[in-house]
């Protein structure tokens, strides 16, 4: 199984947050490959700089920590943009929308806690 982690799942995994339960951790650990999108790195950097997110890693440390955790970084490619044209506007967060589009393009199971993702026809794992 190939996974793409939503931004808050990345944060929970890296900070060993109890919000990420054991079943979800096991799913992530047993996946063939686990991706973290550049969109999530971007979202963490922006929200940290704005004071909307307390995250104790600098951007360069974050990238290294992600790789050290065994996750792969998924760049945003032109073909990832194509599914955006057909996504309904249930969810207007641009970071979430690019994650959805990447999930559809690759294809990857998107791991999230956000119930709004259920409104889309995505390969999804809700935690």
Image (spheres, rainbow, N blue to C red):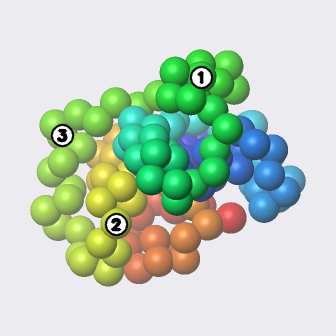
**From where the camera sits, is residue 66 visible?**
no
State the residue at coordinates (25%, 77%). Answer: 89
Labels 1 & 3 near each other (Cβ < 8 A)? no
**Viewer-nearest of labels 2 and 1?**
1
Q: Which residue is mark 1?
A: 61
Name the side, left or right, on which 118 lies relative to 34.
Answer: left
How many numbered discs?
Answer: 3
Q: Which residue is mark 2?
A: 93
Badge 3 crowding class, 10 Å Cα cut-off, few under 14, some 14 to 19, many 20 or more, is few
Q: CA distance from mark 3 to mark 2?
A: 19 Å
Q: Earlier in the sequence, mark 1 or mark 3?
A: 1
Name the side, left or right, on which 68 lies relative to 90.
Answer: right
Q: Is residue 88 above or below residue 98?
A: below
Badge 2 crowding class, 10 Å Cα cut-off, few under 14, some 14 to 19, many 20 or more, is few
Q: CA distance from mark 1 to mark 3?
A: 29 Å
Task: Kindly indicate the quadrant of the structure image that contains residue 39.
Answer: top left
**Viewer-nearest of labels 1 and 3?**
1
């Amino acid at each position: 199984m190939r996974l793409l982690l939503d931004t808050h799942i990345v944060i929970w995994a890296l900070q060993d947050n109890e919000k990420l339960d054991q079943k979800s951790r096991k799913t992530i650990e047993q996946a063939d490959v686990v991706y973290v999108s550049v969109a999530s790195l971007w979202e963490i950097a922006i929200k940290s700089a704005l004071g909307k997110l307390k995250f104790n890693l600098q951007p360069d440390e974050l990238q290294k920590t992600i790789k050290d955790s065994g996750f792969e970084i998924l760049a945003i490619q032109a073909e990832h943009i194509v599914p955006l044209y057909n996504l309904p506007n249930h969810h207007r967060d641009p970071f979430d929308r690019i994650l959805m589009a990447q999930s559809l393009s690759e294809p990857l199971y998107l791991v999230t806690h956000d119930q709004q993702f259920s409104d889309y026809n995505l390969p999804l794992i809700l935690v």
